[in-house]
Amino acid sequence: MSSTHLCALVIDDETQIRKFLDIGLRAEGYEVLLAANAAEGLALAATRTPDVVILDIGLPDREGHEVLAELRQWTQVPVLMLSVRDTEKEKVKALDAGANDYMTKPFGIQELMARLRALLRSRATNAEVSPHYQDDRLSIDLGLREVALDGEPLALTRKEYAVLAMLVRHAGRVVSQQQLLREIWGGTHVHDTHYLRIVLGKLRQKLGDDPTTPRWLKTEPGVGYRFLSGNG
């Protein structure tokens, strides 16, 4: 998955702020998703699995704190809160609710980028397991978001990479269908198992992994999937 850009989701009802962040983030190489309200933002977070979320506290349909609480039910994606409210009470409330950082409007784009880099570094440092897997054919570097097969970069979609990465992080252990769906597609999709079957089928095809004699991706019937860290 070489040359895959990090993805930032911006949830803010101010058109000028969204435009400002869209330009600034794209200039730094990010893929950018834009949402003008909580409903749009939660839908994008569930379906597109961003690497970081920039969330405004004052949204037209729901408070940003409510959006953050809902996100934290199923993902630990780094969240940077934005607000015109600069009191210590507001900042503490956001951080206690699970925000990773807080910035007060107006703000400079370079400071924002520095904050995002720090959040993403921290997330990589706090990864549960080593962010790298390698055998004689397959190489997966979760820190660099790169996958190679027989020395050649493997082009994966965001969903394919997200599923593979989650299985690798739990190598040797069964990851349930519901866990994968909740983390990658969102809490409203925990029963949409056909999504997983499609993505796993494409992953196996790209890896050349036969499901009847799997080397890496093993199906546990009726339960979930397991990444085999050896030869199966």
Image (tube, rainbow, N blue to C red):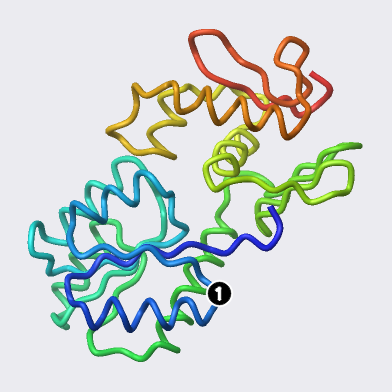
Q: Quadrant of residue 210?
A: top right
Q: Residue at x 29, y 57 (%)?
A: 98
Q: Is residue 214 left or right of residue 126?
A: right
Q: Quadrant of residue 21?
A: bottom left
Q: Residue at x 27, y 70 (%)?
A: 81
Q: Quadrant of residue 54?
A: bottom left
Rendered location of residue 182, percent (x, y): 38, 34
Front-lying residue, 148 or 71: 148
Q: Is residue 38 above or below residue 168?
A: below
Rendered location of residue 166, percent (x, y): 56, 38
Q: Is residue 226 left or right of residue 35?
A: right
Which structural element holds mark 1? loop
Q: Residue at x 39, y 38 (%)?
A: 185
Name the residue that disc number 1 marks: 29
Rendered location of residue 223, percent (x, y): 49, 13
Q: Residue at x 55, y 74 (%)?
A: 29
Rendered location of residue 88, percent (x, y): 17, 78
| Kind of residue indicated by mark 1 | Gly
Q: Is residue 140 above or below residue 189?
A: below
Q: Residues within 10 Å of mark 1 (few under 14, many from 20)?
A: few
Q: Is residue 74 above or below residue 38?
A: above
